[in-house]
Image (spheres, rainbow, N blue to C red):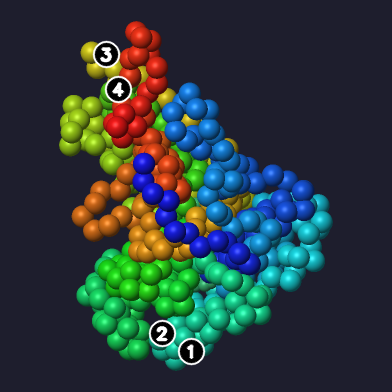
């Protein structure tokens, strides 16, 4: 059994800041406010509704996670953020068209009070949209300082004890790590020099980390996944995590993929296509933004299926992902997966999945949990990349040299064991041998429990 870690208590208010106040962010904020008023339930949130098994199965200890670990309460949350449009959260949520008008009207006063601060924006990184609520600082370093000042002012005005930041803004165009991303010295110099390889999301992440605010990246952009910011996060004792919320089709892939692999069924091809009509879909209609998303979506199956270890089953798999902007769908995304599988003696079979999902409804509890668990990480003194939160991401950020784990069930075990570790409980990996006592299978135990 590990000893209980020292975790500061979640006293006072937690401010949740989101760069980007579009469909996902407003569905999250409105959902928390509605839920606090008893107008709905935070379904999908592990922090609010999850339970955790402790000790042996026979002990029947299954507390709610929120009673087991000291987490910030939804009642103590306040919200803020930045967007290139001036719409307050009520207007933006109405535009996004995810939540029903009646629900939004019931919490109109609270939503109208949340107004976006002017954004750090560069149309070279997000095509297809343009807004007037933007900062006009001369250099990227000045823009970072302006964000730090926004953060400090928000904290003071709202009387917050702590803050977290979750990137909910549009997907930026595909960028790769270059020399200026490799060390904080080079990065800071590049900020001063307005270097074109620094994306707005990196400026937000830099400002958050410098302000001691945990940063989670909900989009597939590089953002905080660069050596300069990873090192800075460690130096500043700040937790970071990313990338790209795991929802929709990729969520289904990481549920189905491990199942097929577990039974060693082969896969010839996996074709995934989507239609969606929200602003995210509009941005992703741009080929460079789609490239960022595509890379994030494609990496998932390789890691789940391990084609190098199982070449006969997965080496020749053809994997294709398509996203199509189709305005009539709005936020109601529709996705189709055609999976060509083969079994015994190579006989071929097919699986078809037609998922009619609501993207932001799936993403909102992810934002909530990330805010809550990143805050927990901060209070527990956990700094740098929080790989235990991979569960929430399509492209989990890992320490250098480590392959990410994509299998959602393995991710969940890692997540729960981190909570057990923090609270000084025995880790459970469900992999121990059956333990026989008086010829009866007594309990599935881990090696650690046997000691
Ligand atoms: N909905 C999901 O299930 C899901 C899953 C994974 C990832 N994501 C990602 O989450 C992000 C948000 O998705 P959404 O559906 O809310 O999109 P959205 O288009 O409705 O909202 C994004 C908002 O970000 C704003 N924005 C763009 N650049 C900005 C900047 N530099 N600073 C501040 N604001 C900026 C836009 O004006 C827009 O209002 C997207 O990157 C999307 O790819 C969403």
Judge depth for marks 4 and 2 and give the one in front: 4
Question: Eyeballing the image, is 323 above or below 280?
Answer: above
Distance in Å between CA atoms under marks 4 and 2? 56 Å
Distance in Å between CA atoms under marks 1 and 4? 62 Å
Q: Which residue is mark 4?
A: 433
- As helix, strand or loop, the secondary structure at mark 4 comes to loop
Image position, residue 392 (x, y; %): 45, 49
Of the residues under marks 3 and 2, which one precedes in the sequence?
Answer: 2
> Is 357 on the left or on the right of 437, as rendered?
right
- As helix, strand or loop, the secondary structure at mark 2 comes to helix
Please state which of residues 373 and 167 is positioned toward the viewer in this rendering: 373
Q: Which residue is mark 1?
A: 137
Q: Which residue is mark 3?
A: 344
Question: Eyeballing the image, is 201 above or below 98?
Answer: below
Of the residues under marks 3 and 4, which one precedes in the sequence?
Answer: 3
Please state which of residues 23 and 3 is positioned toward the viewer in this rendering: 3
Question: Residue at left 29%, top 78%?
Answer: 184
């Amino acid at each position: 059994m590990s000893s209980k870690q020292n975790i500061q208590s979640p006293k006072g208010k937690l401010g949740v800041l989101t760069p980007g106040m579009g469909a996902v962010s407003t569905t999250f904020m409105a959902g928390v406010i509605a839920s606090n008023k008893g107008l709905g339930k935070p379904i999908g949130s592990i922090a609010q509704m999850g339970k955790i098994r402790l000790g042996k199965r026979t002990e029947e200890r299954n507390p709610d996670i929120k009673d087991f670990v000291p987490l910030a309460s939804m009642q103590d949350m306040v919200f803020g953020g930045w967007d290139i449009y001036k719409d307050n959260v009520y207007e933006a949520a109405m535009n996004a068209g995810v939540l029903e008008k009646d629900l939004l009207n019931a919490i109109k006063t609270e939503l109208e009070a949340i107004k976006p601060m002017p954004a750090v924006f560069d149309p070279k990184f997000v095509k297809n949209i343009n807004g007037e609520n933007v900062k006009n600082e001369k250099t990227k370093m000045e823009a970072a300082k302006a964000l730090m000042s926004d953060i400090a002012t928000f904290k003071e005005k709202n009387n917050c004890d702590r803050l977290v930041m979750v990137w909910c803004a549009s997907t930026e165009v595909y960028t790769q790590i270059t020399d200026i991303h490799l060390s904080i010295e080079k990065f800071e110099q590049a900020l001063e020099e307005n270097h074109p390889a620094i994306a707005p999301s990196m400026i937000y992440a830099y400002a958050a980390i410098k302000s001691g605010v945990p940063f989670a990246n909900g989009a597939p952009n590089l953002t905080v996944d660069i050596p300069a910011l990873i090192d800075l996060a460690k130096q500043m004792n700040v937790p970071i995590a990313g990338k790209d919320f795991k929802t929709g089709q990729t969520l289904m892939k990481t549920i189905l993929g491990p199942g097929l692999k577990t039974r060693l069924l082969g896969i010839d091809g996996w074709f995934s296509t989507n239609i969606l009509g929200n602003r995210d879909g509009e941005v992703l209609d741009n080929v460079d933004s789609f490239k960022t998303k595509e890379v994030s979506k494609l990496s998932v199956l390789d890691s789940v299926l391990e084609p190098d270890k199982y070449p006969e089953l997965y080496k020749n798999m053809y994997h294709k992902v398509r996203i199509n902007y189709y305005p009539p769908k709005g936020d109601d995304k529709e996705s189709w997966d055609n999976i060509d599988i083969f079994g015994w003696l190579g006989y071929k079979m097919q699986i078809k999945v037609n998922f009619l999902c609501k993207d932001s409804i799936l993403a909102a509890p992810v934002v909530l949990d990330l805010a809550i668990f990143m805050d927990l990480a901060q209070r527990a003194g956990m700094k740098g990349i929080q790989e235990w939160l991979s569960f929430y991401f399509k492209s989990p950020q890992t320490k250098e040299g480590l392959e990410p784990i994509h299998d959602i069930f393995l991710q969940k075990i890692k997540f729960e064991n981190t909570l057990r570790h923090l609270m000084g409980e025995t880790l459970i990996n469900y992999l121990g041998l059956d333990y026989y006592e008086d010829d009866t299978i007594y309990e599935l135990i881990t090696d650690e429990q046997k000691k």
